[in-house]
Amino acid sequence: MNDAKRFSVGQLAELGGVSRRTVRYYVQEGLIPAPYGVGRGSHYGTKHLEEILRVKAMQEQGMTLETIRRRISSESTASVPMADVHALVPRSRWTRMELMPGVEIHISSRRRVPTPTELEELADWCRRRFRQDTEENDG
C-alpha cells in the first residue's frame, strides 16, 4: 500500500460527499476497493476517495450503477496481462441475512433482496416451521 493518507469511513464519506452507508455499499458492490485492514483497524486511502469521486462523476453523466460497475470491471480486467486473465477466479457477491437464530438466507447480487415485509414473512414462516419440527421431535 503506497497510500500515505488514511481516512476513517466517516472522513472518506465526508470528503467524497456521500454517506457512510454509501461508502459501504460501494465497497459491497465492487465500485470501490475494500478498505485496508480489518475490523477497527480498517481505513481508506486517497485511491478510495478518487474512486468515489469517479463513481459520482459517472452518475452525474447519467450512468446507472450497473453500467458503472460493468465499466469498472472491464477496466480492471483489461489492465490484467492476457497471460493472467485465465488465472482470475470468478467471484460473486452475496448478502447474508439471519432470519432467526441458526437460520440464515444468502442472496446473490444477481437477485433482488426481499423487502423488509417479505423478509419478516419469511422469518415468521421459519419460526413456525422450526417450532413445529422441534415439537414433533420432542413428542
Image (tube, rainbow, N blue to C red):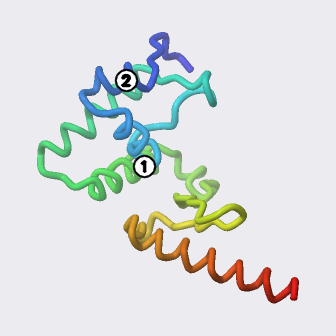
Give the class, few, some or many, for how many residues have Cα within 10 Å of label 1's Cα (few <14, many ≥20): few
Q: Which residue is mark 1?
A: 78
Quarter placement of the C terminus: bottom right
Quarter placement of the N terminus: top right
Amino acid type, residue under disc 1 in the picture: Ala
Judging from the image, what secondary structure is the residue with disc 1 in?
Answer: helix
The answer to whether residue 24 is above or below residue 129 is: above
**Residue 34 in the figure: left or right of residue 69:** right
**Residue 111 in the figure: left or right of residue 125:** left
Viewer-proximal residue, 107 or 104? Answer: 104
**Residue 74 in the figure: left or right of residue 100:** left
Image location of residue 61, percent across then percent down: 12, 45
Viewer-proximal residue, 98 or 47? Answer: 98
The residue that appears at 76% across and 84% down in the rendered structure is: 133
The answer to whether residue 68 is above or below residue 121 is: above
Q: Nearer the viewer, mark 1 or mark 2?
A: 2
Q: Which residue is mark 2?
A: 12
Q: Are marks 1 and 2 in contact (CB under 8 Å)?
A: no
The residue that appears at 67% across and 67% down in the rendered structure is: 103
